[in-house]
């Protein structure tokens, strides 16, 4: 098994496995989604944290840009390589994805940060 991703975005993976998955960047709500296409200057940040730890203290920190965005399926391709999880102990962690939108891509001319996927389980098995 490389990784399983449930319908509610829970990831289960073996420690040290490589995998990738697409995620749409919803800057709206679950009831009224607004899907965003990344533009030049935008970045997405993924953090994998221990329970009760803030995003800034993530054990795994990944940064994605426009080169990681697949316009054909309107999704950001999230990639994990072996080294990302190799040294994690088996257990339950949490991941979160935030989108930084450059001010030139936002109507009010201010940088914007949106949590596009709130804290979700990330389970590492041995």
Image (tube, rainbow, N blue to C red):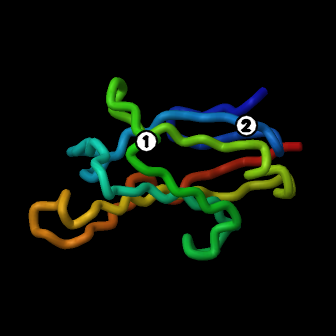
Quadrant occupied by the N terminus: top right
Q: Secondary structure at mark 2?
A: loop
Q: Nearer the viewer, residue 11 or 110?
A: 110
> x%, y% of residue 124?
78, 47
Direction right: furthest residue:
126
Which of these two is toward me, 6 or 41?
41
For the residue pair 27 and 68, the one nearer the viewer reads as 68
Residue 45 at x, y = what percent? 49, 59
Q: How many marks?
A: 2
How far apart in space, not on screen, are marks 1 and 2 (Cα)?
Answer: 19 Å
The residue at the point 21 percent across, 45 percent down is 32
Residue 58 vs residue 70: left or right? Answer: right
Mark carried by residue 67 = 1
In this picture, residue 70 sits left or right of residue 32: right
State which quarter of the image contains the C terminus.
top right
Q: Residue shown at 34%/56% (left/top)?
A: 42
Image quarter of residue 76: top left
Q: Earlier in the sequence, mark 1 or mark 2?
A: 2
- Residue at x 27%, y 63% (from the top left corner): 102
Q: Residues within 10 Å of mark 1 (few under 14, many from 20)?
A: few
User: Nearer the viewer's eye, disc 1 or disc 2?
Assistant: 1
Q: Which mark is residue 107?
A: none
Q: Position of residue 89 (x, y in %)?
A: 86, 57
The mark found on residue 18 in the picture is: 2
């Amino acid at each position: 098994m490389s990784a399983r991703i449930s319908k509610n975005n829970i990831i289960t993976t073996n420690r040290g496995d490589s995998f990738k998955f697409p995620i749409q960047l919803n800057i709206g709500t679950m009831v009224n989604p607004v899907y965003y296409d990344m533009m030049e200057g935008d970045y997405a940040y993924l953090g994998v944290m221990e329970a009760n730890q803030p995003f800034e203290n993530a054990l795994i920190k990944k940064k994605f840009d426009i080169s990681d965005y697949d316009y054909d399926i309107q999704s950001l391709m999230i990639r994990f390589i072996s080294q990302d999880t190799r040294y994690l102990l088996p257990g339950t962690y949490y991941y979160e994805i935030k989108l930084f939108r450059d001010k030139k891509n936002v109507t009010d001319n201010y940088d914007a940060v949106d949590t596009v996927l709130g804290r979700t389980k990330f389970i590492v098995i041995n």
